[in-house]
Amino acid sequence: MIDLSTQYLGLQLKSPLVVSASPLSESIQNVRLMEDSGAAAIVLRSLFEEQLNLESYTLDRDLSQGTESFAESLSYLPEFPDYRAGSDAYLDHLMRVKECVAIPIIASINGITPGGWMHFAKEVEAAGADAIELNTYALVTDPLVPSNEVEKHLIELVAHVRSHIKIPLAVKLSPQFTSIPNLAVQLADAGANGLVLFNRFYQPDFDIERLTVLPRLCYSNSSELLLRLHWVAILFHRVRADLAITGGVHTAEDVLKGIMAGAAVTMMTSALHQYGIRHLAAVQADVVRWMKDHEYESTNQMRGALSRSSVPDPTPYERGNYIKTLSSYPLHRAPLHQTHQRK
Ligand SMILES: Cc1cc2nc3c(=O)[nH]c(=O)nc-3n(C[C@H](O)[C@H](O)[C@H](O)COP(=O)(O)O)c2cc1C
């Protein structure tokens, strides 16, 4: 009997297969199907700090008939009703989900500035969330803001949220930091029980005909996993926080690689949007088959086997790998003498 169980954020999970935040978990039917298909935990979609601020702005305005000075900053929020659905709807949904399934449910809040919205973390806890995932997606565009200030701010934010709640806290990070290991250690010291690596960077595209900048969301593929494997493998056993991979987990092989890098759990969104929620069951069956074929008895046995601290030669994780990779490219494969055909 293969033992897939894992510990994540102090929660005992039946496997490393976790559904990451997306609108898929907005439907109770989907949530049930996720559990039936083998999901060990579900992260609900995020409620944004901006949504909570919008609520308190609307309340203030109704109470005092104040000015519209805050309204401009709220125009970022999409108009469709789902993203306007506020904290009450979120808490109601969370409670319904908790009633319907037995697996742990992780609420998600997306916020970057300390403020009144943090009380929502407490409400989420009271509503029965097993943990909170704090998504810290932020983009610094101001040339006057130095990177150490950005990191300090993030660490303070995590400490602040930690002080509001008793349930476990995971922090979903972006990969654009100068020293990820140092930041990871500081976030764990500030109270993060888990680090979720990484947010995808949704890069806008240009429409050169209409001279506009367009938001673009495309699904991931397994090639995006490599960035996550790299950093999880480096952080494994060097930070006092559980590690979760989100981004590019599509197949059983991706899950196995994630565990071997050192992840406690591997999360999926794009794959479930593309192939359906039952894909989880197929992935789990493939993981079990592979483990049997390779005589592994448990995921714990293989966790971190390819981490930086476990492999005999850590150079693939270091600068040496860069030099080696580039210098190993055979020049004869470059099409130097081909004439470029213009269309
Ligand atoms: C349609 C869609 C909606 C998402 N909504 C959220 C969200 O509300 N909160 C969040 O933290 N991540 C959200 N994500 C990001 C996913 O949770 C996940 O981190 C990301 O898609 C990378 O994983 P993947 O490669 O399995 O898709 C969303 C992704 C998609 C595709």
Image (cartoon, helix red, strand yellow):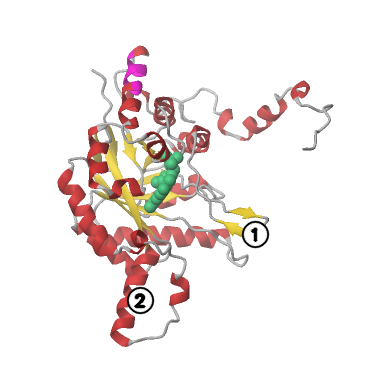
Q: Specify whether tag 2 is near ligand 1 (CB below 8 Å).
A: no
| Residue carrying label 1 | 210
Q: In the image, residue 227 lies at what x, y percent? A: 52, 38
The residues tagged by marks 2 and 1 sit, at their Cα atoms, a distance apart of: 35 Å
Q: In the image, residue 339 lies at what x, y percent? A: 84, 30
Q: Main secondary structure of the magenta part?
A: helix
- Tag 1: residue type? Arg
Please give the name of the residue rendered at 37% of the width and 24% of the height, measured from the top-left corner. Answer: 302
Q: In the image, residue 11 lies at what x, y percent? A: 24, 41
* Label 1 environment density (alpha carbons within 10 Å; few <14, some 14–19, many ≥20): few
Q: Is residue 336 left or right of residue 312?
A: right
Quick one: quadrant of the C terminus? top right
Residue 48 among magenta residues = no
| Residue carrying label 2 | 57
Q: In the image, residue 246 lies at what x, y percent? A: 42, 41
Please give the name of the residue rendered at 26% of the width and 58% of the height, measured from the top-left corner. Answer: 90
Image quarter of residue 55: bottom left
